[in-house]
Amino acid sequence: MSGQEAIREQGLWDRKDVHHDKIGTHTLGFWLYMLSDSMVYAALFGASVVLGHRMNAAGGPMGATVLHPLSAYWETLLLLASGLAYGLALQGLKRGRKALVLAWMTVAFLLGAGFAALSVHTLLALIARGITPERSGYLSADLALIVYHALHIGLGLVWFLVMMVQVAVFGFHPNVVYRLLNLKLFWFFQSFVWVLVFSFTYLRGVLI
Amino acid sequence: MSSYEEEPLSHPEVRDLDVRLSVASFVATAALLTFSFMVVVRDAWSIPSLSIAIALMAGLAAAAQLIGALQLTLAPSRRWFTACFLLCIPLYMLTVGLTAWMFATLYTRTMMPHLMP
C-alpha cells in the first residue's frame, strides 16, 4: 500500500466498507446522541436570547437581582476540577490501574456533587424569595436552562456511582471501557455547556 | 471477536487519551473565565465592551474544552467525533440565530417601543 493509499484508508472519504469495533461503535453512537441533546440546549439558549429583555420580566426581577456570578464562579471551578479529576482517572484506565481509576473517579464525583449542592442551594434560595419560573417569561427561560443543565449533572453523578461499582466488580471489561469513554463524553460536554451558561446567562445576564 | 474485545485497553480511543490536554484545558478555561468574571464584577468597562469580552472569552474557553477535554482533533480515532460536531455548528447557528432574528423586531412592532433600550 502506497503512502497516499494509506492516508486515504484512514480518511473520512474512505469508500470501502470498514470494520466497526464494539467500543468505537458505542462511543460514536453515544456522541451522536449527545449532539442531539445539544440541540435542546441550543433551543433553550435561543429562548433565553429572545426572552432576555426587561419587557419579558413582566415587572419582576431581572438578572442583576436574580443571578449571583460569584456563586456561579465557584460552581465553574468545581465542575472544571471535576472534569480534570476524571481526565486523571482515564489516565489510570490507559495504564490499566483500577485503584487509580477508582480514586480519581471518587474525587471527580465529590467535586461534581459540590457543584450540584451549590446549584440546588442557589435555586432553593431563589424560590424562597418568590423568584420562580412562573413569575415571568424571562425567569422561565433562564431557570429552564439552568435546571436542565443541573439535571444532567445529577444524572452524571448517578452514572459515576454505577461506573465505580462496575469498575470494582468487572474490571476493565470491554463493556466497562466503552461506558467509561461514554461517561467522559457526557461529563466533559456538560463542562462545555456550562462555559456557555456561565458566560451568557450569568455574566451577560447581570448586565441586562 | 475483534482484538479490542480481548484487550480493550489497546483500543485507539483509550491509547489516545492524553492527560496533558486535560490539564491544559482546565488551566486555560479557568483562566479565561476568571478574567471574564473579574471584569464583570469590577464593572471595569462599558456594557458593549464587557459583552464583547464575555463573548470572546467564552469562545476561547469553549474551544479549550472541545479540543483539550473532549479531544475533538483530527487524530484517526477522533476525526469522526470532530466531523459530527462541526456539522452541528450550522444547526446551532440556525436554531439560536433564526429565533433571535424572528423576534428581533417583534417588540418594536407589537409591544411597547418606549421600553426598548
Image (cartoon, coloured by chain):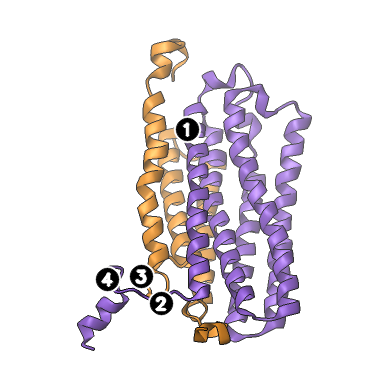
What is the distance, in whole Å, between disc 2 and disc 4 at their CAs?
A: 12 Å
* Residue at the (69%, 61%) spot, across then down: A159
Say which residue label 4 marks: A15
Q: Looking at the picture, does residue A94 appear above or below residue A78?
A: below
Element at badge 3?
loop
Give the crowd class for mark 1: few <14, some 14-19, many >=20 residues within 10 Å: many
Q: Could you say where residue A149 lies in the image, as x and y percent from the top left?
A: 61, 46
Disc number placed over residue B74 in the picture, else none: 3
| Chain of the residue on which disc 1 is drawn | A
Nearer-N-terminus badge (2/1): 2
Q: Residue furthest toward the bottom? A: A1
Chain assigned orange: B
| Chain of the residue on which disc 4 is drawn | A
Say which residue label 2 marks: A19
What is the distance, in whole Å, between disc 1 and disc 3 at their CAs?
A: 33 Å
Type of amino acid under label 3: Leu
The image quarter containing residue A61 is top right
Type of amino acid under label 2: His
Nearer-N-terminus badge (1/4): 4
Q: Looking at the picture, does residue A185 appear above or below residue A164?
A: above
Give the crowd class for mark 3: few <14, some 14-19, many >=20 residues within 10 Å: few
Say which residue label 1 marks: A49
Element at badge 4?
loop
**Visible residue check, residue B63:** yes
* Residue at the (74%, 26%) spot, across then down: A130
**Is A73 left, or right, of B116 in this rendering?**
right
| Chain of the residue on which disc 3 is drawn | B
The image quarter containing residue B94 is top left
Colour assignment, chain A: purple
What is the distance, in whole Å, between disc 2 and disc 1 at their CAs?
A: 44 Å
